Image: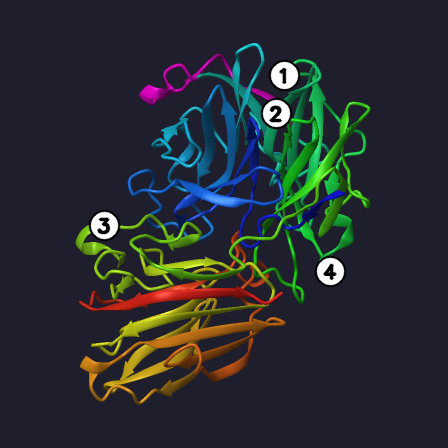
Amino acid sequence: MALIIKNPILSGFSPDPSICRAGDDFYLVTSTFAYFPGLPIYHSKDLTRWNQIGNAIDRPGQLCFDGHQISEGLFAPTIRENSGTFYILCTLIKNGGNFILTAKDPKGPWSDPVWLKKAGGIDPSIFFDDDGKVWYCGTDSPPEGEAYSGNKEIYIHEIDLSLLAEGKVNFLGESKGIWQGALHHVIWPEAPHIYKINGWYYLLHAEGGTSLDHAVCVARAKNIQGPWEGKKSNPILTHRFLGRNAGIINVGHADLVDDTEGNWRMVLLASRPFQGVCPLGRETFLIPVIWEDGWPLAATESGMVERQITINKERQISNKRFFENCCDRFEGRLPLHWLVLRMPVNGKDAAFSLSERKGALRLFTRKADMRGRDHPAFAGRRLRHEDWAFSAYIEFAPNAENETAGLILLQSEDYQYRFELYSDSGNLSLRLVRAAWKEDEIITKNNLQITENKEKLKGIVLGVLCEEMKLSFFYGKDQYSLVCMTDNIDARILSTEYAGGFVGTLVGVFASGNGKDIDNYADVLWAEYRGLE
C-alpha cells in the first residue's frame, strides 16, 4: 500500500506556509495580506488531508489594516509549539512591524499581538533550543547597508519570553548576522527557519525572489552563532531552470516537519500556471524529504515538486480536498474559509451584518467601493481550480442611481470583474464591469425589466463560470433557469502576471454606494462554489 500526496495540499491563495507538530497532530498557517480573518490555521493527522479549524487574527482590535492595499498586510507567518503553548510570529507590513501571538489551543482564541520593536526586517521565525534558550530569526538589511537591491541578511537574536503574558519580549545582547544567501549576489534571502537535528543546527531559507527564480536553500552549523556552511549543491529545491511554461513554478518559501515515525516532510509555496498566468496565486504544496550525508534531499522521483507523489507506507490515504463543492449559508457568521477586506468596522459604520436578517449576509451600500483602500461591503472565498462555477442568491432594490451590488472576481484594487445590479432610470439593471489598471470599462449591460413593484421584488441568482480561462456570466430567478448574459471574457487579467502583488483571486459578493453613504443594503442568502476539474 502507499501514501498518495496530491498537490497542492491547499489549493488557491495559500502562500508562505509554515508547519509544526504537537504530538500526532500537525498545524499549518499561511499568509493573508490585507484580508480578514487573517492567518488561517489548518489541522491534519496525516499531512495530506487538511481542515481549517480557525484563524489567528479573528476579531477587530487585534490589528489595523486601514489604508492597506490588498497585497500589503500580513506577510510570512511562522507557527511553532513549545511546552503546550503555540506561537505565531508574523510581519504587518506598512504600519506595524513584527509581532508574536500565543494560544493554548491552535483553534483559538489567539492573544493580541505583542510587538517585537527591536526586531527589524521581515519574515520572523522562532527557535526553541534544547538548552532552554529561545532565538528570534529574521531577515533584514546587513549592518553595512545593501550593496545592491535585495541584498539582505538572515540574523538571530536571543530573546526572553518570561514576560510574554505581560506583553513584553526582552531581546538579550546583540543580534548577529549568520547568513546572506547560498549563491553569489543572491537577492532576498528570506523565510528563515532553524532546526536542530542530530547535533547540527540547520537553516532552511528561500532566496531569488518569490517568482520564477524562487528557490529553497539550506545551511548548517555546529554552533547556532556560526560559522554556517551552505550545502554545495544549493539550491536543494527550485523550478527556476524549467521556465515559465512548466506545470509548477515559483517554488520556494519552505518549512520542515517530522512525524512520530521519524519521516520528514517539507511544505512550500508554488504556483500552477493556466495558459501562462496564475489566477490562483501561490498555493501550498508538500513533498517528502530524506537525509543523506547530513543534508536534506527532496525525495521525489524527479527531485522536484510533483502533482502526485506516492510514498511506500502500510496504509492507503488520498487527500481529497475540502470545499471543492460547497454551498455556503450565513447562519450568524461567515464560514471559516470566507474573507473580508481589511479589519471590519462595527456599529453604525459597519459594511455588513450577519444579524440584521436571520440566515442572510447583509451588505450595506456605504461609500466605500471595491477600487479603494477603505472598508467595502465585500465577502468572498478563494478560487481553487482552473475551471469552476460560482453563484449567489441576492436580494437588492437600489434606491439611487449610484448604488450597486452583485458578484465580484477580485484580484486587486486595480484588476477585477464586477457583475453588478444597479438602477437605470428606476429599472433594475445588470452590467459587467472590467477594471484593468485605472479604467472601469462596461463590457455589457441589460435592463432586467422586473421592478414594476419594488415592494414585491424578489431575489436574483447571479453566476459566473470559468472554463479554459474564459468567463461566462449568468442571471436568473433561480439556479435552474439561468440565462447567459455574456461569455468568452478573458480571465487572465485576474493574475499576478497582470496585476502584480502577492495574492490569488477571490470570488464573492459586494455592495457599494460608490462614493456616498446610502441607507440601503443587499441581502445574500447563499453562495455556491463548485470546482469543475
Marks 3 and 2: in contact by CB < 8 Å? no
**Mark 2 / mark 1, whichever is N-terminal:** 2
| Secondary structure type for disc 2 | strand
Q: What residue did someone put label 1 on?
A: 224
Quadrant location of the C terminus? bottom right
Residue flagged by tag 3: what amino acid is it? Asn
Question: Alpha carbon of mark 1 to alpha carbon of mark 3: how far?
Answer: 47 Å
| Between discs 2 and 4, the one toward the N terminus | 2
Residue drawn at the location 60% of the way across and 71% of the way down: 469
14 sits to left or right of 97: right
Q: Nearer the viewer, mark 4 or mark 3?
A: 3
- Residue type, mark 2 in image: Ile
| Distance between the alpha carbons at the discs numbered 4 and 1 | 40 Å
Residue identified by numbered label 4? 245
Start-end of magenta stretch: 161-180
Residue 242 image point, x, y percent: 77, 53
Instruction: Answer with left or right where residue 110 lies relative to residue 83.
Output: left
